[in-house]
Amino acid sequence: MPSLPSTMIFRAELRLVAIDASVIGKIERYTRAPENMTEAGGILVGCYRGPHVEITECSEPLRRDRRSRLRFDRDDPGHQDLAKRRWKESGRVLTFVGEWHTHPESLPSPSSIDLNTWREVSRKNAAGSTVFLIRGYHAWWAGLASGRTLTRLSVIEPDAD
């Protein structure tokens, strides 16, 4: 039986985004019942390696967040607290690198609300590029924002042995 890869890798041109398997597992849990009855989301924590992004951790929905069937609002300060804690603990290496949320559809795509929110988030992220992930029931949508430009990422499929 083949083992699961330790990371999932997305790319846009010469830029890569590597996501640790533990992050993938946490996010995918929210696409299964009973969690999939409402949207879920959180932040992505990781580091920048030149033009590349490595995601090592994510926050999950917290008590003060607002979740509904078609919307997730990250309102709990615990998400920002996680990013600040990792920043301090890592000697300013780990930081906020993006955000994720789920959509109640098989093949997700960003809504106009997502796109408007992401413009604001990426404008405020002085550390570097910002990763945005949407997990649907059967697929991912991933994007990388640099300045005012949002580029869709494509998944790099692992070679079959």
Image: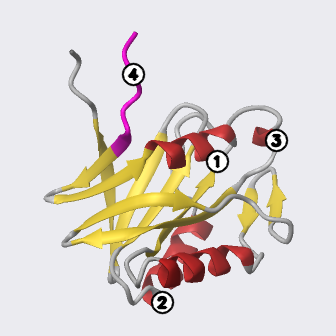
The answer to whether the residue labelled 3 contacts the one labelled 1, judged by CB atoms less than 8 Å apart, is no
Few, some or many residues within 10 Å of mark 3 (<14, 14–19, 20+): some
- The residue carrying mark 2 is 124
Q: Position of residue 4 (x, y in %)?
A: 41, 27
- The residue carrying mark 4 is 3
Secondary structure beneath label 2:
helix
Q: Position of residue 116 (x, y in %)?
A: 55, 76
Image quarter (top left, top right, bottom left or bottom right) of the N terminus? top left
Q: Which residues are magenta?
A: 1-8
Gap between marks 4 and 1 measured at Cα:
28 Å
- The residue carrying mark 1 is 103
Q: Residue flagged by tag 4: what amino acid is it?
A: Ser
- The residue carrying mark 3 is 37
Gap between marks 3 and 4 measured at Cα:
30 Å
Secondary structure beneath label 4:
loop
Q: Residue flagged by tag 2: what amino acid is it?
A: Lys
Q: Residue flagged by tag 1: what amino acid is it?
A: His
Few, some or many residues within 10 Å of mark 1 (<14, 14–19, 20+): many
